[in-house]
Amino acid sequence: MVQQSRPSPQSSGPSGGYVGKHARSGSGNGSKAAAIPPPAKQRGFSSAGARDRRSYAAIDLGTNNCRLLIAKPSADGFIVVDAFSRIVRLGEGLASSGRISDAAIDRAIAALSVCADKLRRRHVTLARSVATEACRRASNGSEFIQRVYRETGIALDIISAQEEARLAVLGCHALLEPGDGPALIFDIGGGSTELVLVDAHGDGAPHIVDWVSAPWGVVSLTESEAFDHDDPAERLAAYGRMRARVSEAFLPLARRLPRNAQGIRLLGTSGTVTTLASLHLNLPRYDRQVIDGLIVPCDAMRAISDRLSGMALAERQQLPCIGTERADLVVAGCAILESILDIWPAERLGVADRGIREGILRGLMDRDGRAM
């Protein structure tokens, strides 16, 4: 089921990764976009104010990953003091069973226990923990949330697709290329993909014009297609079916997107785009400092997607920045990305290694500033 609406206007990795980072240009392969701006400063805080001594945390439990950021405010935005990320595959088997499996629950709780320990050790003052598509879909989602709280003390909030889209935009919109044209921001998750059309001018948060949440992410789309990975013809046919599924889910928004608009911009936040950008640069290993904010030609991303979709699983496992954990999922991500490029034919794609967690942190800091 595709979730969509036309919302009314609405008003970050390694330690220190979001601070003091200015726009940089690459040489041929891509270029760097602007860094994340600071939260609102009109709350009466000096740089040495009480809020600067606080630690804030954001946990994003997705269909594939569990991620944590702990940060403190700074004059340039915020400084990340601790981070954690682990692939937990919470949505594994969900499409067929309708439930989160016992094995997936155990993996998620193990990861969240690490997060809980970090929250205690870093003396976090204010935190928000969210769960997304897997918990929205699962018949035992609420039961899982209760167990997480009993065993870790972390109170997960199952957020709506619209809130997920809003947080992703809030967390990464600063990396949009400068310009006056309409912009599309997307987040390819494990269980769903959010596309958000925004009107972005100036330094503030962009105005959300339209959005759609499609029930296809890298996990759900991969599990929708069972095929012989060693048969080239079957690989090609399965990729075509993936593309067709995603295109159908995007169709409601595609019909409403502006036609023949000038200067359109595109920004993606997901493991898919960061992985493909790493392959574009031929990196021997993933490097967030190089990837976050990179601008890549869309034709290059299509070419990489085409190459990966034709590879056998064992071949993809040997590629740097993919490995065994992502090799079976990256093709579905390519199918989603290409379907996005079909409906929004921008020349360049901005790549963001930031999103929901950063959006949560900005919201927490801003809200806490108002309260004080």
Image: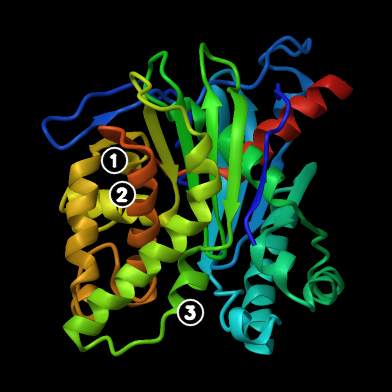
Residue nearest the observer in this picture, 29 or 258: 258
Asked whether the residues under the numbered discs 1 and 3 touch, taking CB atoms below 8 Å apart as contact, a structural biologist would say no
Label 2 CA crowd tier, 10 Å (few <14, some 14–19, many 20+): few
Q: Give the residue type at disc 2.
A: Asp
- Residue 357 left/right relative to 231: right
How far is disc 1 from disc 3 in space, using C-alphas?
Answer: 32 Å
Residue type at mark 1: give it: Val
Disc 3, SS? helix
Could you tell me which residue is drawn at 79 percent across and 62 percent down?
154
Check whether the beta carbons of the residues at disc 3 and disc 2 lie within 8 A of each other.
Answer: no
282 vs 143, left or right, is left
| Residue 223: image tag | 3
| Residue indicated by mark 2 | 287
> Residue 29: x percent and y percent?
15, 37
Q: Residues within 10 Å of mark 1 (few under 14, many from 20)?
A: some
Number of the label disc, if any, that sits on residue 59: none
3 or 2: mark nearer the eye = 3
Q: Residue furthest left?
A: 28
Q: Nearer the viewer, residue 97 or 283?
A: 97
The answer to whether the residues at label 2 and label 1 have Cβ atoms under 8 Å apart is: yes
Q: Secondary structure at mark 2?
A: loop
In the image, residue 162 sits, relative to residue 66, either above or below, namely: above
In-image side of 96 versus 269 (left or right): right
Q: Describe residue 331's horizontal placement relative to residue 66 as left or right.
A: left
